[in-house]
Structure formats: structure tokens, C-alpha cells
Image: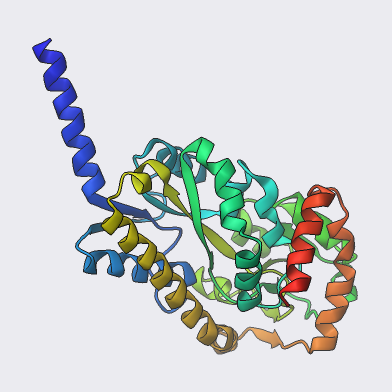
């Protein structure tokens, strides 16, 4: 009995110590110049420190892959994670609406739609079963464009002979709608794929080729503004629910601080991301509104491809249209 009591006391002490420190699992390098998600994490962490909390940033990969991070969130071993949106989608696919091409004009439009639709409340009803909460969607950079090794792209027809790296089946469907082809390639294999010609390009934010040192072989960026690349900020529900009212208010204020810092950074990055590419010798195709409209129109079949239930697609398109 004494041994059991001691063990219980030790576990309680460990739990108390763990809850005293807020661990934030990062999704990339701690770079305030090029990383939108780190701007969020930095401002969030500083706000918590100012409120008297201990904060520790966990480097990317130090607490495992996406699935392992989510498991640790669910068990309360990790308090905060900047995660791939797919981590949330595995529990509630409704979140995939944020990845429909051209669903949002910009981040301000996205924020209005999320608020009007009480999207976080809806997602968290499902996530609560996994002891997790999503509290923010954080753009990691400006809207994604078409990144290629050879072809300069100004219209879907320019991609007819390109094989593009796809993140998942949703992107393959989009490339097909544009008259191109896609193949799923893990991110770690992308540089080799680009250099060997296995793939001709991929879709991402303009900062990505610079951040990952790809500008020796990436030569073109088309500012098509297709999708806002983002991370989901996930909390441990057990940790959040266990906070005092004062602590919870401080955490909520820190989320707001992170959102504000991220959006302020994004406004500048939308310009500097393109000039950073040009400084590295990458040609930037700045598309007109009319040229983007061609891509937007060509993307419409993706909405009816069966990748999301039709009723969910309607919810997202209605939110988009009513908050534009």
C-alpha cells in the first residue's frame, strides 16, 4: 500500500510538473523571416511567458511525426502542436474545406468565414472525443502558386506536359482538372524528384523553395493564389480544461496574439516572398486577376469530385460566398 501510495504521489508530481510547462511542438525552423507558423508560435509563447507560464519550444521531429504528435496531444503529454491540417481531418474531414482551391480570396476572407460558420466549435465537438481541440488555423506563407523546374506557367494549358508532385488525392484531382497529371511524393523525396525529372514541380507558398534551398533547380514560380497553405494549432483538451480561469484567459489571449502576429507577418510576406525568389534567380509570373480566374474556373470540378461529401462542400461554398 505504501509503495502504491508513493507511486501515485510520484505520478501526481510528474503530472504537476508537466502541466507547469507548456510545450509547443513546432512544424519547421524557428524562422521569423520566412515562417508564418513560427511567427504564430513565437508570439503565442511570449504572451504565455508574460502571463507567468513556462514555455518550451520543441523542434520539428523531436516529439515524433504527425501521428505521434497527435497521440501525445490526446494523452496530455504534449500541450500544443502546430500540425498538418490532415491530423484534424483524420478525426473530422470537414476541415478539408479550407483546402478547396480558391475557396478563400485571402486570409481576411478565411477568418470571416471561419467565424461566421463557428467552424472551430463544430470541429471541436468531434475532436473532444480524442481529447484534442483546434484553436487556430495559421497560414505558413502566402497563397500557394505553381513551382516548376522548367516551364513558366500562366494558364492551365501551360501545364499539359508537366507531372506535378501531389500531397494527396485531392491535389491529383485538381491537377487533372487543369489538364495536367499528379503523383503523390513524400516531401523528403521532392528535391531528388525535381532534380531527376520524376516530377516537374509542385504547389506551395513562394517561401518554400528558398527555405528548403531548392532555388538551384527550381526556376519558375507562378503566383496563381490557389490555396492558403496552413497549419492547425491543436491543444491538449485535458491540459486546457485543467487550467484555472485566469490561466485559460491568458492562453486565449495568447492565441489572439499569435493570430495577430501571423496575419501581420503575412501582409509583408505576400510581397517579400516573391522578391526573395527573384533574388535567388527564380522567375516569377505575377498573374492578373483575369489569369487567376481561368485557374479558378478550371478548378470547379474538384468541388464535385467526391473528395468531400456534397453537403460539406455546400457549407463551405455558402460560407465563402456570404463572407466575400
The image quarter containing residue 104 is: bottom right
The image quarter containing residue 139 is: bottom right
Locate residue 30, reporting x and y percent. Answer: 37, 67
Q: Name the residue rendered at 79%, 89% in the picture.
A: 288
Q: Is residue 181 visible?
A: no
Locate residue 97, reporting x and y percent. Answer: 71, 58
Q: Nearer the viewer, residue 280 or 293?
A: 293
Could you tell whether 312 is left or right of 89 in the image? Answer: right
Q: Name the residue rendered at 36%, 48% in the picture.
A: 240
Locate residue 253, reporting x and y percent. Answer: 36, 67
Total number of numbered discs in the rendering: 0
Could you tell whether 129 is left or right of 108 in the image? Answer: left
Q: Nearer the viewer, residue 37 or 30?
A: 37
Q: Is residue 193 visible?
A: yes
The quarter of the image holding the N terminus is top left
Q: How are the colours assigned in the image?
A: rainbow
Q: Nearer the viewer, residue 312 or 153?
A: 312
The quarter of the image holding the C terminus is bottom right
- Up the image or down, 267 lies above or below 179; here it is below
- Up the image or down, 228 lies above or below 189; here it is below
Q: Nearer the viewer, residue 51 or 148?
A: 51
The image quarter containing residue 46 is: bottom left
Locate residue 133, reporting x and y percent. Answer: 48, 49
Amino acid at each position: 500500500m505504501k509503495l502504491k501510495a508513493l507511486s501515485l504521489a510520484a505520478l501526481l508530481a510528474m503530472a504537476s510538473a508537466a502541466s507547469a510547462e507548456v510545450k509547443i511542438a513546432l512544424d519547421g525552423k524557428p524562422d521569423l523571416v520566412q515562417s508564418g507558423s513560427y511567427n504564430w508560435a513565437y508570439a503565442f509563447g511570449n504572451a504565455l511567458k508574460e502571463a507567468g507560464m513556462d514555455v518550451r519550444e520543441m523542434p520539428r521531429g523531436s516529439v515524433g511525426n504527425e501521428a505521434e504528435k497527435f497521440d501525445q496531444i490526446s494523452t496530455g503529454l504534449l500541450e500544443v502542436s502546430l500540425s498538418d491540417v490532415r491530423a484534424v481531418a483524420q478525426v473530422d474531414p470537414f476541415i478539408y474545406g479550407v483546402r478547396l482551391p480558391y475557396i478563400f480570396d485571402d486570409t481576411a476572407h478565411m477568418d470571416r468565414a471561419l467565424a461566421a460558420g463557428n467552424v472551430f466549435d463544430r470541429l471541436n465537438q468531434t475532436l473532444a472525443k480524442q481529447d484534442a481541440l483546434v484553436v487556430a488555423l495559421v497560414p505558413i506563407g502566402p497563397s500557394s502558386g505553381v513551382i516548376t523546374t522548367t516551364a513558366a506557367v500562366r494558364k492551365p494549358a501551360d501545364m499539359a506536359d508537366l507531372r506535378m508532385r501531389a500531397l494527396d488525392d485531392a491535389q491529383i484531382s485538381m491537377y487533372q482538372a487543369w489538364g495536367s497529371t499528379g503523383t503523390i511524393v513524400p516531401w523528403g523525396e521532392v528535391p531528388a524528384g525535381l532534380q531527376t525529372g520524376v516530377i516537374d514541380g509542385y504547389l506551395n507558398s513562394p517561401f518554400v523553395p528558398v527555405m528548403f534551398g531548392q532555388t538551384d533547380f527550381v526556376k519558375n514560380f507562378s503566383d496563381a493564389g490557389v490555396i492558403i497553405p496552413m497549419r492547425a494549432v491543436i491543444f491538449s483538451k485535458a491540459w486546457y480544461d485543467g487550467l484555472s480561469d485566469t490561466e485559460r484567459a491568458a492562453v486565449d489571449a495568447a492565441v489572439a496574439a499569435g493570430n495577430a502576429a501571423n496575419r501581420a507577418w503575412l501582409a509583408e510576406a505576400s510581397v517579400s516572398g516573391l522578391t526573395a525568389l527573384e533574388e535567388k534567380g527564380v522567375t516569377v509570373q505575377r498573374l492578373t486577376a483575369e489569369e487567376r480566374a481561368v485557374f479558378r474556373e478550371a478548378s470547379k470540378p474538384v468541388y464535385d469530385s467526391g473528395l468531400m461529401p456534397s453537403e460539406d462542400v455546400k457549407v463551405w461554398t455558402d460560407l465563402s460566398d456570404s463572407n466575400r
